Amino acid sequence: MLEFLFWISAKKNVVALALLGAALVTIAPQVSKWVERKQNPESDHKQKLLAQALERFLIRAGYVFVGLSITLFITAGFIVDLK
């Protein structure tokens, strides 16, 4: 169990999660605009709701990854003395 904790809270994993989260939050509005541009005239409202829901999902997923990265960073600080 402790070996897994050392591996998951390694610097490369923490940084990768932070970058993934930041990338998701950054590209979410652009993906939303891209989905809105691909709309048909008859499904305008439905497509806009889909774009907004997708943007919300990507932003929340990005914040989850950043939060996980912060949690692992704090965990790494506590377990550094256990090596």
Image: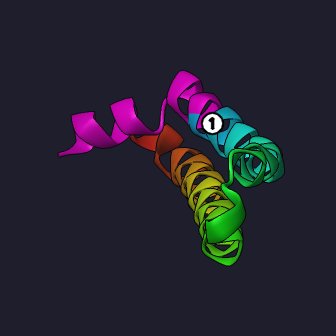
Residue 13 painted magenta: yes
Kindly identify the residue that appears in the image at 82 percent across and 44 percent down: 30
Residue 77 in the image, given as x and y percentages of width and height: 60, 47
Kindly identify the residue that appears in the image at 77 percent across and 41 percent down: 27
Nearer-the-camera pick, 18 or 29: 29
Q: Residue furthest front?
A: 42
Is 14 positioned to the left or the right of 10 in the image? right
Regarding mark 1 in the picture, which secondary structure is present there?
Answer: helix
Nearer-the-camera pick, 24 or 17: 24
Amino acid at circle 1:
Leu
Q: Kindly indicate the quadrant of the structure image that contains residue 83.
A: top left
Residue on which the image places disc 1: 20
Is 61 positioned to the left or the right of 66 in the image? left
Residue 35 painted magenta: no
Residue 25 in the image, given as x and y percentages of width and height: 75, 51
Label 1: few (<14), some (14–19) or many (≥20) C-alpha neighbours in 10 Å: some
Q: Kindly indicate the quadrant of the structure image that contains residue 3.
A: top left
Examine the rendering and report whether any part of residue 6 can be seen. yes
Kindly identify the residue that appears in the image at 72 percent across and 61 percent down: 41
Dominant SS type (magenta): helix
Examine the rendering and report whether any part of residue 56 can be seen. no
Give the extent of the magenta segment: 1-16
Residue 50 in the image, given as x and y percentages of width and height: 59, 67
Nearer-the-camera pick, 83 or 50: 50
Residue 23 in the image, given as x and y percentages of width and height: 73, 37
Q: Is residue 53 above or below residue 33?
A: below
Kindly identify the residue that appears in the image at 60 percent across and 61 percent down: 54
Report the number of numbered marks: 1
